[in-house]
Structures are given as C-alpha cells and as structure tokens.
C-alpha cells in the first residue's frame, strides 16, 4: 500500500509497533488510540502516515464501532507545522489513503476536529484549522456545523428536583423511540435537520438510537422521562457512558411543552444520575447555533471547554 509522491512516503502503519511513530504529532485523541486499536475501533490499515525519510510530516486516521468493517468517521488529521506545503501534503495523504480505506464508490465519512473554543479569534489557532479545512475542501468536503463541547465537573452545584415534575425510567425502547421521533419537530440540531430531508422522524430516531444510545456501555436504567402530575411526558434525558466518557447523550423537551423551563429540570436530573455514580466529569455537546440548549447547559454549570468542527461530503 506504500505510495511515493513528491518525496513523500504515504502508507498505513504496520501495526501497534508503529503507534509511537503515529503519535509524534500532538492531538487530544492520542491517548485513546492504543485502546481503540485493541478494541477494534481502529485498525492499522485505517491509520495513514506521510513520511519524508524518517520524519512524520502528516497523518490521518479513521474510526468505527468495533462491529463495523467500514469506518464512518475521520477524526485524526494532522500535519507538521514546520512543513512549507502543509495543505498540499494533507491533500496528497488523503488522496492516497481514501481509495484503500473505503470500499469502491463509497462517500467518505465525515471529519470531526476538536479545536479551541476561541480558535477563530487567534492567528496561531486559526491558521492550522483553516489549512486543514482547505485540504478537505479540495476533495469535495464542506463545513457542516460547529458544535460546543461542554463539561461538568464534580463539586459544581446541581439544582434540586423540581416540584412540578416526576421522573421515571422508560418502559421500553419503543417508548423512548416514540419520544425521540416527536421531539424532532422544530429541532435546532443541524444533523437531525439534515437527516430529516431523507428520513422520516421515526427512521431518524431509530438511526440515532442505533448509532449512539444503543452503544452505551452503561445500563438504560439511567435514562429518565419527565412527566407532569397526570403522567403525561414532557421530555427525556439519556445520561450514560460511551467508550470514553460519562455523557448527557440526548436531552429534549416535547414541542408542546417547550418554553416552560423543563429543560433545566431534565438536565439537572440527568446530571444527578451520573454524579451519583461518582464520575470524574460529564461531557455533552450541542450546536453553536442552538442557543437555547447551550444556555441550558451553562445554567447547569457546564463550561465550554472546546469546539468541534464537522465536515461532510455531499
């Protein structure tokens, strides 16, 4: 699979023995890569490097759930800042790797990149981000949405339970899927809105469940539905653990109950469920443009510690 191009050697790593080589370029996910390979979420043939002699000048890696044979996320893409032809190098690396990582004719998976919250305001962070986006755009990708990454830490106060709501576990998956489909009406989430152009609300709910909630390593007993005194549901929250962090995975209020502050009660309850497990942190995310949801997290003591840029191919 080795390719020589403009003095670059472009190839996948040979295995775990070359992980130190791959990690010569810094990124926030480096500490996760060894366990990802061990767990089958990454494969050496999905982890490509661009070398100039023995020097690592760029790298790319794709991710999938352990049961998938085709990656559905490009989440590592780095280039040596000392290089003069950074955009060209990233483009060459991706053009060499994509035909070998993906099946023939497959649309490349989305790219997600974690960046500082104020990345666009500082030249030292803006330039590397824009160069990476430029390389991806040359291959037909485009920026889809920018998201906030939020974090709650132990010791942060949690609002007491509301007197106006009760909380219970979902009766079964079907009840939760029904609520997930209903909350898509008027959603401000960019991914959900895009998916609804080609799926029904029920199909989108099932897709979301299969790709995220259904893969939690925590029990569904942690999930909560909020109800009024007559038992009518007003919304739900799904606190859980993915393979990396405790998370607030899905938080939503039914359309007919929005505007009454129920989102604060739901978020407090989900946070309480995880805090009772003694977790070291809780992570969450929402679109930068989803101001009502972002404000709810901030009121609950979550801080914006990072942003995530989502690139997609159409």
Image: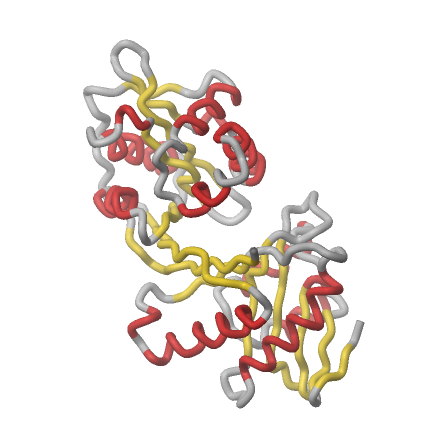
Whether residue 278 sits left or right of residue 16 in the image: it is left
Numbered label tally: 0
Q: Is residue 217 at all visible to an observer of this figure? A: no
**Residue with the most extreme front position:** 197
The answer to whether residue 232 is visible is yes
The residue located at (65%, 77%) in the rendering is 92
* Residue 75 occupies quadrant: bottom right
**201 or 244, which lies in front?**
201
The correct choice, above or below, for 152 with respect to 229 in the image is below
Return the x and y of residue 249 as percentages of the image width and height: 43, 39
- Seen in the picture, residue 256 relative to 33 is either above or below; the reply is above
Seen in the image, is 62 located left or right of residue 240? Answer: right
In this view, 53 is above or below 307? below
Image quadrant occupied by the N terminus: bottom right
In the rendered image, the residue lying farthest to the top is 230
Residue at 67% of width from left, 72% of height from top? 95
Q: Position of residue 276 (x, y in %)?
A: 36, 34
Nearer to the camera, 92 or 105 = 105
Q: Provide residue 283's location: percent of width, then percent of height.
A: 39, 48
Q: Nearer the viewer, residue 295 or 164?
A: 295
Q: Position of residue 49 (x, y in %)?
A: 67, 74
In the picture, measured across the screen, residue 19 lies left or right of residue 307, that is: right
- Tell me if 199 is positioned left or right of 93 in this view: left
Q: Quadrant of the C terminus?
A: bottom right
Q: How is the image coloured?
A: secondary structure
> Image point 28% across, 24% down: which residue?
256
């Amino acid at each position: 699979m080795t390719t020589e191009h403009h003095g670059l050697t472009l190839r996948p790593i040979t295995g775990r023995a070359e992980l130190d080589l791959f990690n010569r370029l810094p990124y926030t996910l480096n500490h996760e890569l060894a366990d990802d390979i061990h767990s089958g979420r990454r494969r050496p043939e999905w982890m490509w490097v661009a070398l100039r002699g023995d020097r690592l000048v760029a790298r790319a890696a794709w991710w999938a759930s352990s049961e998938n044979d085709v990656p559905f996320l490009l989440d590592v893409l780095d280039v040596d800042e000392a290089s003069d032809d950074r955009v060209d190098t990233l483009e060459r690396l991706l053009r060499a790797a994509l035909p070998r990582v993906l099946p023939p004719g497959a649309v490349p998976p989305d790219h997600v990149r974690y960046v500082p919250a104020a990345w666009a305001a500082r030249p030292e962070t803006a330039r590397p981000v824009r160069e990476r986006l430029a390389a991806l755009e040359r291959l037909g990708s485009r920026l889809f949405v920018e998201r906030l990454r939020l974090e709650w830490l132990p010791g942060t106060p949690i609002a007491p339970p509301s007197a106006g709501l009760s909380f219970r576990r979902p009766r079964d998956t079907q009840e939760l899927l029904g609520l997930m489909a209903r909350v898509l009406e008027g959603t401000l989430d960019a991914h959900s809105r895009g998916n609804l152009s080609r799926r029904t609300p029920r199909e989108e709910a099932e897709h979301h469940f299969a790709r995220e909630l259904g893969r939690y390593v925590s029990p569904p007993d942690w999930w909560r539905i909020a109800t009024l005194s007559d038992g009518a549901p007003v919304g739900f929250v799904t606190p859980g653990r993915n393979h990396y962090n405790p998370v607030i995975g899905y938080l939503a209020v039914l359309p007919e109950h929005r505007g009454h502050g129920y989102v604060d009660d739901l978020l407090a309850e989900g946070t309480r469920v995880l805090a009772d497990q003694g977790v070291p942190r809780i992570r969450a995310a929402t679109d930068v443009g989803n101001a009502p949801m972002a404000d709810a997290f901030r009121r609950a003591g979550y801080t914006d510690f990072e942003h995530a840029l989502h690139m997609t191919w159409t």
